[in-house]
Amino acid sequence: MLCQGGGGGSWLRFFLTALLWPQPLPWVAAASGAPSELRVRVRLPDGQVTEESLQADSGADCVTLELRKGDGTLITLTADFKQEVKIFRALILGELERGQSQFQALCFVTRLHRNEIIPSESMAKLRQKNPRTVRQAEEVRALEHLSMDVAVNFSKGAQLSSHIHNVCAEAKEAIYTREEDVKFWLEKGVDGSMFEVLPQSSDLPNLQRCRLCADRWRPCICSYALSIEWYPCMLKYCKSRDAAGKVSSYKCGIRSCQKGYSFDYYVPQKQLCLWDEET
């Protein structure tokens, strides 16, 4: 299964040669169910250019996007269409001089809604005419603020999505979700024992945001922001007319989007959230 995210398991990589753009271009079908990978050059907000990997497995019905930020942080988004789950993972380089480990891993698990990203089958068919072109999203979607008030038990997470086991392997103690998403999954029959409600400000009156907390060993509410700089968010359709005058539509391109997310979540000590210091 390809859509597992980097950093664990063996990767089966198939390279495509071109990405379908909004102008009418032919869809070239990949082998049915065959995993595929596309690499796109994108510009980061600081002006740097990075390479983004888009992987699709129509057989497993999943999509993974991965890019490395200018500071070395590796961001991964896995969309599990079968289970209606999306998984964000951040591998953040640690500051050894401040007592941190070599890297810190975070996983944020939320509900995947319809039409957030193009289907895996369509993603697997994407082509690109100019692989060296630096892409910028056509649409910048609104920043989404998410309060991650529930922890996910890693050992039971596969019941929610099989991809959690691999994608979040480095973040076993730092997998977060939202109570409202948990309610949705419980209605689908997911085992509730994998979820644990985290302490909130109402439970701990002295609980502050980490950027306002002076003591690195006190619990606090951490904030982490990430952005998916370029991804195919919508399919475009064109119309054609046959000899008899009958009009029909066909897929003729994609619309690309950029979207940022900001996650708030509880940490037992500020030392786990040093990027969120007040400047």
Image (tube, helix red, strand yellow):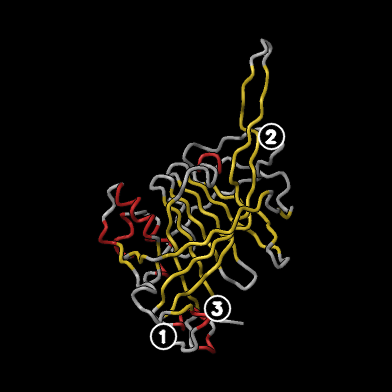
Which of the 4 quarters of the picture holds residue 251?
Answer: top right
Q: Residue at x 56, y 50 (%)?
A: 37
Real-space Cα separation, disc 2 to disc 3, in angstroms: 44 Å
Residue 217 at x, y percent in the picture:
42, 87
Q: Which residue is pictured at 33% across the width and 75% down the height?
A: 203
Q: Which numbered circle lies on residue 218?
A: 1
Q: Residue 261 carries which label?
A: none
Q: How many marks?
A: 3
Q: What percent of the width, then of the height, locates residue 57?
A: 48, 46
**Image quadrant where one finds the C terminus:** bottom right
Mark 2 and mark 1 lie on one chain; the one further toward the N terminus is 2
Q: Is mark 3 on a helix, strand or loop?
A: helix
The residue beneath circle 2 is: 25
Q: Residues within 10 Å of mark 3 (few under 14, many from 20)?
A: some
Query: How many residues crowd mark 2 within 10 Å: few (<14), some (14–19), many (20+)?
Result: some
Question: Which residue has dot 3 on it?
Answer: 275
Q: Nearer the viewer, residue 68 or 193?
A: 193
Task: From the viewer's side, name the closer residue of 162 and 33.
Answer: 162
The amino acid at mark 3 is Trp
What type is the residue that disc 1 sits on?
Arg
> Is label 3 or label 1 in front?
1
For label 1, the SS is loop
Location of residue 249 with respect to 68 vertically, above or below: above
Residue 226, image x, y percentages:
56, 64
Q: Residue furthest top?
A: 244
What is the C-alpha distance between the residues marked 2 and 1? Answer: 56 Å
